[in-house]
Image (tube, rainbow, N blue to C red):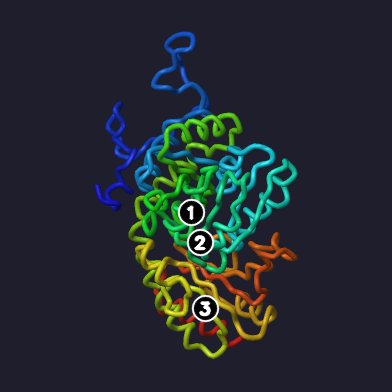
Amino acid sequence: MKFETLAIHAGQEPDPNNGAVMTPVYLTSTYKQDGVGKPRQGYEYSRTLNPTRKALQDCLAALESGSFGLAFASGLAATNTVLQLLNAGDHVLAGNDVYGGAFRLFDKILRRFNLDFTFADTTDPESVAEALTPSTRLVWLETPTNPYLRITNIQAVAEIVHAHPNKPLLAVDNTFATPYLQRPLELGADIVVHSMTKYLGGHSDVVGGAAIVKDKELADRLYFLQNAVGAVPGPMDCFLVLRGIKTLPLRMERHYENATAIVEFLASHPKVEKIFYPYHTSHPQQKTAKHQMRNGGGMISFIVKGGRDAAVRVVEATKIFALAESLGGVESLIEVPAAMTHLSVVGSPLEVDPALIRLSVGIENKDDLIEDMQQALEKA
């Protein structure tokens, strides 16, 4: 089945008891067993597995061209669980433009457990090759990155990583692109991670995370950790994400249409110093983006002339773009990453330009969005 059909039907058969078309929300913590140690269909306790969560996990696996999906309570819960595949002394190579929450987890928490982290420019495959060490066990990519929207050639990096004697795992955070625009497992990644809070949910009403893999042995290790650590979503959260996924293809096309119009507007505005958008001609990795992504997505970053104060004036002046963290909802959002989502990287090599503004372009009328940006930039 094509993607649009999978988004609506994968993992979501009508209920066998009554024919309900929509996946039921199974609000139960435990399940009656047929005998001692004889659970029905593998269900014994909802931390381990819940029918609503299973439907979501199966849908995620299908959309990412994977074989096994795992849902978590947040994107960082998924990230943390993947990192728990490692042992003390292992080395992780990560991109030098990762989400602030991921950097905080890596640098402020997991280093205390004797994991070693290096941050490199993953847009240059040679930089990845040079940064690998004898103890590297995981390479962590975001593409597009948050917030500079840098693009990594997943296939090129996968070839380098898998040719290394240690055979490190390659994990790709696919939150910004979604499986509709990009499927890292098809390009050689071992693990795909999502914050389902963003585009997969799509309506800013749920928090969740996901990991998808092809390899059964790796999946079994992750399922063990999912159950042992217990950072799982509730069934209502899973239902909301499933509902959001059904319109993912439609939303991603509209996000792209609106983002393209706004990029064209920003590119000619005298108060905009620089634009970051994967499909724009000014983007240094535009060729790679067009090769591995269906379209440029709905995220835009730009630097406004006048520094931090000008950026603050702009984001506080919008009327349709809501000044808020997060992204990927049907409504448009605006923020200053250096002072908001990426505050944790201040003072580090990953520090974000304080004049950078990040837009999550929603699905409103594009003319209204451009008019809102116009009046806000007048206050820069």
CB atoms of marks 1 and 2 within 8 Å: yes
Query: In whole angstroms, how far apart are the C-alphas of marks 2 and 3?
Result: 24 Å
CB atoms of marks 3 and 1 within 8 Å: no
Q: Which mark is residue 125?
A: 2
Which residue is rendered at x = 48% and y = 37% of the image?
Answer: 235
Viewer-proximal residue, 119 or 112? Answer: 119
> Is 62 situated left or right of 229 in this image?
left
Label 1 neighbourhood size at 10 Å, few (<14), some (14-19), many (20+)?
some
Label 3 neighbourhood size at 10 Å, few (<14), some (14-19), many (20+)?
many
Classify mark 1: helix, strand or loop: helix
Residue at which label 3 appears: 275
Classify mark 2: helix, strand or loop: helix
Answer above or below: position of 168 versus 224: below
Amino acid type at circle 1 is Ile
> Is 352 situated left or right of 211 in this image?
right
Query: Mark 2 or mark 3: which is in front?
Result: 2
Amino acid type at circle 3 is Ile
Q: Which mark is residue 211?
A: none
Answer above or below: position of 201 versus 36: below
Viewer-proximal residue, 214 or 208? Answer: 214
